[in-house]
Amino acid sequence: MKMTTPLRRMAPLALLAASALVLTGCAAGSDSDSDATATPAADACTSYTSGDESESVTVSGDFGKEVTAEFTTPFEATELQRTIVDEGDGDVTAAGDSVDLRINVFKGTTGEAAIAEDATFTVGDPQIFPAFLAGIECVPVGSRVVTTIPAADLFGEAGSEGLGIAANESVVVVTDVSKIVPPLTAEEWTENPPTVKFNGEEPPVLTLPEGEPRPELLVDVIEEGDGAVIKKGDTVTTNYQGTNWNTGEIFDQSYGKEPLVLPTTSVVEGFGTALVGQKVGTKLVVSIPPEYGYGVEGSSEHELAGQTLVFVIEILDVE
C-alpha cells in the first residue's frame, strides 16, 4: 500500500512505535498480584504492575519539558512495570481519547536520553507500543508516569537501530500526560458539494466544485446505509478514492485492488472522523484540509503535505 493512502500521518516517534512485532494493544499488562497503578476508571483499564524496577527511577524536571531520569546503570528490567510518580488532578484518560503528552525515553545501559519530544497518542491504539500506551492509559491528566521494560519487549528481537538500543538492553520511559484533545467533528457539506457518480466495482467519477478548497472538514452523505454505526476505534472496511483538490488528480484508490481494512484511529484524522457516526452501507465524500490530512505545508516531507484531500468513501463493513 502506498504512503499516499489514508494511513495516518505520524510523527517520527509514532512511526517508530508502529511495528508488527508489538501490535498487542493493551495485552502487555502483568498478571502479577503486586500493587497495580491503574486507576479505577473502568473494566477497560489494564492492570499494570508497579514494582521495584519502575519505583527505583527518580525523575526531575519541569512537567511537559525535557526531564532527567536517575537510575542505577546498567538498568535491567524483567517485565513491563508502570508507576505513576506524580498523579494529576485532571480527567482520567479512557479508551479512544487522543492525548497530548511529553515522552522521554532513556537507554538502560547508559542512562542517556534516546527520545525527548511531544506527541499525541490515542489510548488503546494497537499501532502504538504497549509500553508507550501504558504511560497514558487510565491516568489523570497532569500525571507523570514511569514505565520500565526490556528493550526486546518494546522493539522486538532486533532492538532499535535508529535509537541505538539493542534487544538485550532495558528501557525507561517517562511520560507527562498533558491533556485530552477534544474530538474533531466534521461540518455538513451543504453549500456546493461535489458530485459523485458510482459505477459498481469500477472507480467512481468525482466532479469537484469550482473555486478554492474550503478550510473546514466537510462531509456530504450521498447515500445513508442501514447497517451498524461506526464508533471511534472500530476496524472499518471501505472502498475509497482520494483526489488532491489542489491538482484535481487522483492520488490513490482501493477500486481495482483490495478494500481498505483499518481502525478509524489508524488513518489520517479527517478520514477517521468522517467514518465515526456513519452506518455500514453509507456512501460519502469528505474534504480534508491539510491539518487533518498529511499536515500543513512545511510540516513534513510527505508529497501531500499542504494539500486539501477529497475522499469518496463507501463503508462496506465494521468489526
Image (tube, helix red, strand yellow):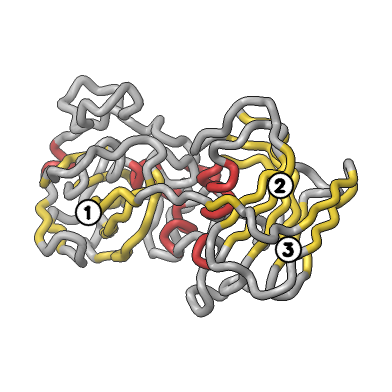
| Residue beneath disc 3 | 243
Determine the residue positioned at 53% across, 77% down. 297
Determine the residue positioned at 20% across, 66% down. 65
Determine the residue positioned at 43% across, 53% down. 159
Query: Is residue 174 at all visible to an observer of this figure?
Result: no
Q: Quadrant of residue 315?
A: top right
Residue type for callout 1: Asp
Residue 180: image x %, image y %? 30, 48
For mark 2, does the 10 Å Cα neighbourhood hold few (<14), some (14 to 19), or many (20 or more) residues?
many
The answer to whether the residue labelled 1 contacts the one labelled 2, judged by CB atoms less than 8 Å apart, is no
Q: Is label 1 or label 3 in front?
A: 3
SS of the residue at dot 1? strand
Q: Nearer the viewer, residue 36 or 280?
A: 280
Q: Nearer the viewer, residue 223 or 254?
A: 223
Residue 187: image x %, image y %? 54, 52
Label 3 vs 2, first from the N-terminus: 3
| Residue beneath disc 2 | 313
Residue 96: image x %, image y %? 41, 39
Left/right of residue 193 with respect to residue 22 in the rendered view: right
Label 1 vs 3, first from the N-terminus: 1
For mark 1, does the 10 Å Cα neighbourhood hold few (<14), some (14 to 19), or many (20 or more) residues?
many
| Residue beneath disc 1 | 176
Left/right of residue 78 with respect to residue 158 in the rendered view: left
- Alpha-carbon distance for marks 1 and 3? 38 Å
Count of all numbered marks drawn on residues in the image? 3
SS of the residue at dot 3? strand
Residue type for callout 2: Ile
SS of the residue at dot 2? strand
Query: Is residue 34 at all visible to an observer of this figure?
Result: yes
- Alpha-carbon distance for marks 1 and 2? 37 Å
Q: Quadrant of residue 130?
A: top left
